[in-house]
Amino acid sequence: MPSATATGRGSEEYDRRLRDTQEELERIQQQREELERERQELEELTNRKRVFVSQQIELTERLTSALTLIDRELYQIRNEADDLEQCRVCFADHLEKVQKINPENWTRENLSEKLEKAGMAIDIAADEYDQAASHFEGTRGGAIFGRASKKARSASRVRETTEFISNLRNGFAFNLPLLVLGGAALVVYYLK
């Protein structure tokens, strides 16, 4: 028969093992919960990273596209500005020449010669003006020469067409009673 002390020691040993096992289970449970928290945090970080990368790619594409369009626009603007500067210098030269022409100071003897030279200067200036107007037609500078861009002209045509149709409709509406009365008067006249 086992002694009470041996049974007590066995029971203590059993209790100690049970406590150790429970502590081990609690530690494993805490590790499991910690690992689950870390997994959720990692998932959240991964999702946030995915969203960030997606937004980064989208914004990069938009900015790249905008920069390309801005560069093209600036290139066109610079070219047009250079052309306008050359045109301004040329026009200033022609204006100076045209303003120097003073027919009042011409004598009768050189009137024909001076008129011919002045006419040529005017023709050259007018030709260069027309060439510049043609060159800048359809650009921002087209309005300088009284020639709006194609978009502005087409918008103007649409506006004019719409205005014409509106006026036609209003005119018909205003004159409809007169037409009805006139038609009725003709019917009465022919029936008598």
Image (spheres, rainbow, N blue to C red):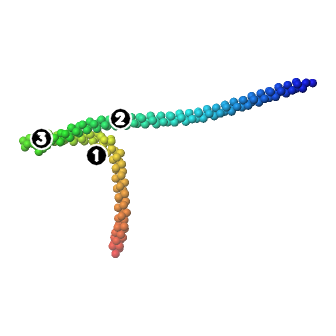
Q: Quadrant of residue 44?
A: top right
Disc on res. 114: 3
**Residue at the image position 59 percent from the left and 33 percent from the top:** 45
Q: Residues within 10 Å of mark 3 (few under 14, many from 20)?
A: some
- Say if mark 1 contacts mark 3, CB within 8 Å: no
- Mark 1, secondary structure of its residue: loop
Q: Residues within 10 Å of mark 2 (few under 14, many from 20)?
A: few
Dividing the image into 4 quarters, which one contains the N terminus? Answer: top right
Disc on res. 115: none
Quick one: label 1 or label 3, which is nearer the N terminus?
3
The residue lying toward the viewer, choosing from 50 and 27, is 27
- Mark 2, secondary structure of its residue: helix
Spatial CA span between label 3 and label 2: 44 Å
Q: Identify the residue position indicated by label 2 in the image.
A: 75
Residue type marked 2: Tyr
Quick one: label 2 or label 1, which is nearer the N terminus?
2
Q: Can see residue 183?
A: no
Residue type marked 1: Gly
Spatial CA span between label 2 and label 1: 24 Å
**Residue at the image position 49 percent from the left and 36 percent from the top:** 58
Residue type marked 3: Lys
The residue lying toward the viewer, choosing from 188 and 146, is 146
Q: Identify the residue position indicated by label 1 in the image.
A: 146
Q: Is residue 153 above or below residue 89?
A: below
Q: Find residue 51 and report its horizontal and vertical position in percent.
A: 55, 36
- Compared across the picture, whether 166 is left or right of 122 comes to right
